[in-house]
Amino acid sequence: MRLENKVAFITGGNSGIGLATARLFLAEGARVAITGRNRETLDAAARELGPDVLALQADVKDVAATERAVARAAERFGALDIVFANAGIGGNTPLGKTSLAAFEEVLRVNLTSVFFTVQAAAPHLNKGASVILNGSVHSVLGAPGYAAYAASKAGVRSMARVLASELSPRGIRVNVVSPGASHTPIWSAQASTPDAYAAMEKRLARGIPLGRMGEADEVAKTVLFLASDDASNIQAAEFFVDGGTTGSPMGAPIYRT
């Protein structure tokens, strides 16, 4: 098993990519602590994942709550080998129609909270640990209406390089996984019914070279690679899991004759 005897801490581990990653980490032998702000979904995740998971209610915007969650994970399992700063939110912030509060909320959850998650974890990290930050294709796409989200995810990729420089003396790796459009609950605000979701999925797939949305498990497998010793010489890198959206956009179905 690739993570045998490893200890992992995952924010937003109660749904989507975080939950898929927790599930995979457990299968690979890790002991896992997850956080989430929604008690109901956190309890459901804990029931699914089983007794070897420590499920902690914590809002990543609350720095003190994150610090307490990390400390409890380390107390329960020992020093951390893996941190996946995964928690994040979507948010449409079109020019001319966005309040300061809405813009800052996206930045606070997706960027500021990532920094303070890593800061909280840093004293508890083993030498040679792996830190993975969750980015997004939006950091480079320039999609209309997503200024705050794009800025937050571009900030994550830049911040990862700084954190890698700071943590390299301890042999700690910091990398980014950047998903494209994937089947996760983050889309629920844009497609609240099955018909709306199907229409959205069809529309998005036309702009993805592989012709489909991704799966949370596909992102989780990349996180697993970065967390494992297989990635022992990978530092300050960004891995796009996007079906070619950023690397070969002209190969998408919308451009085919």
Image (tube, grey):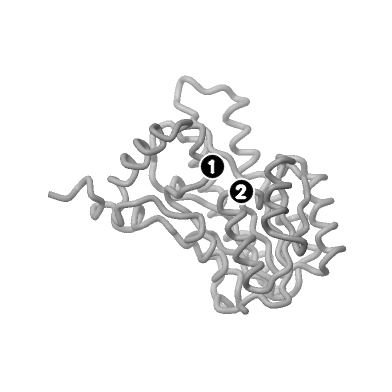
Helix, strand or loop at disc 1?
A: helix
Q: Which residue is labeled 1 in the image? A: 185
- Of the residues shown, which amino acid type is indicated by label 2? Ser
Question: Is residue 218 rendered to the left or right of residue 175?
Answer: left
Picture residue at 60% right of the left edge, 25% below the top: 100
> Horizontal and vertical percent for residue 216?
50, 55
Disc 2 and disc 1 in contact, CB within 8 angstroms: yes
Q: Secondary structure at mark 2?
A: loop
| Image: 20 above or below 189 | below
Identify the residue at horizontal 62%, vertical 79% (top origin): 1
Give, as a three-letter code, the residue at label 1: Pro
Residue displayed at 32% across by 51% down: 208
Query: How far across and down, in percent of the image, does residue 231 sit?
Result: 55, 75
Per the image, the residue denoted by label 2 is: 15
Label 1 Cα neighbours within 10 Å, binned few <14 / some 14-19 / many ≥20:
few
Q: Position of residue 239 (x, y in %)?
A: 47, 62
Residue 169 percent location from the top left of the image:
70, 73
**Quarter-of-image position of residue 160:** bottom right
